[in-house]
Image (cartoon, rainbow, N blue to C red):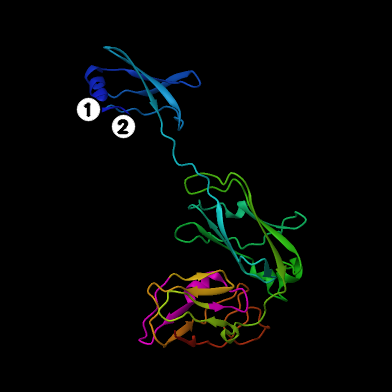
Amino acid sequence: MSFLRPATAASLLASASAGVVYAQDIDLQSAGALASLATADALTIAPHFALLEGRTYELTLNLDGGRTTFDITLPTADVEAPTIVGFAPSQAVTPANTLRLYLTFSKPMARGHVRDAVILQRSDGSDVPSPFLTLAPELWDTTQTHLTLLLDPGPIKQGVGPNRSHGAPLVEGQQYRLVVDAHMKSATGVPLGRPAQILFSVGEPESDPIDPDDWHILAPPAGSRAPLTLAFDRITDTGTARRMISVRDSADQTVIGVIETDGGGWSLPPLHPWPSGTQTFTITINPALEDISGNAIGQAFDAPAGTIGTRQEPVTVTVQISA
């Protein structure tokens, strides 16, 4: 029994031939049979009812040699409630044909609750019916702290059945509220405790393919650890932006750093300072990069029916870093 000092446990074992353990909650003054007492080479107590964290219990052992009573207090576990610490896109206005929303939680979350716990509401308080794709498994990252919500692309694409019959989930010019229910739980079973609400407005849809020529590049000074920054012309999907853009030096070595992006831009603060003097670096953009409306480099998500896609090659852009 882990909460007994070794000397206490040894003396109880020495005097015990048979017995029953009783427990009384000191705060509630309620008593009840707690467990059977083993008489082998260890003192094993198997509770007949759940003991509460933070409570102090008075244990009484009725043994052949008499009655022994002592107090134990169960430690209180970490019950800090999870919170939402991030939402993307973080911009105040998002395109009407947005495909993905991202939530970041402070703690790993339990799986299987997204369908009932996350809803999308209009400004009048009415729910948008079935706005998200129902997927099994849900789209959590490996830490179970980052959740991807996919807006159903059927209603978003123009001219297809769901769009004609139900309309798109987001309407230009309207305001929306993403609500996460207070009962959504962490992986350890602790609920949020109160609902979380995220407000955003919807602007005109983004229907054009991505063209990196429309970006602005902000080069850092040589010899510094200031970030190399890309300013996008639209809200880019943060998930693909972290994976699909890289920087290599003149020796064709990847520049290592922690990529930062909020969808409106991308920056790379290097792990080591940029070289002194003037050097040329190459930015490579994988054609799989998407904006939050699903448009890729050279390819629009909502292309007209019958459009034949073409295979896109990575796009490279050179930038000089100098003092």
Which residue is more in the foreground, 131 or 280? 280
**Magenta stretch holds residue 233:** yes
Position of 39 compared to 163: left or right?
left
Does 305 appear above or below 293?
below
Residue sitting at x 67%, y 66%: 92
Image quarter of residue 2 = top left
Between 134 and 232, the one lying in front of the other is 232
Which amino acid lies under the numbered mark 1 shown in the image of this protein?
Asp
Q: Nearer the viewer, residue 176 or 311?
A: 176
Name the residue beneath numbered marker 1. 41
The boundaries of the magenta stretch are 230-257
Q: Secondary structure at mark 2?
A: loop
Residue 135, horizontal then vertical, whole percent: 56, 61
Numbered label tally = 2
The alpha-carbon separation of the residues under discs 1 and 2 comes to: 14 Å
Where on the picture, by quarter, is residue 46?
A: top left
The reply to whether dot 1 and dot 2 touch (C-beta < 8 Å) is no
Q: Label 2 neighbourhood size at 10 Å, few (<14), some (14-19), many (20+)?
A: few
Residue in the picture at 57% in, 76% down: 290
Residue 312's mark?
none
Find disc 2 in the rendering and name its residue: 2
Reply yes or no: does residue 167 show up in magenta: no
- Residue 126, quarter of picture: bottom right
Task: Name the residue at 52% across, 44% down.
Answer: 190
Residue 112 picture location, percent across and down: 54, 53
Q: Is residue 73 visible?
A: yes
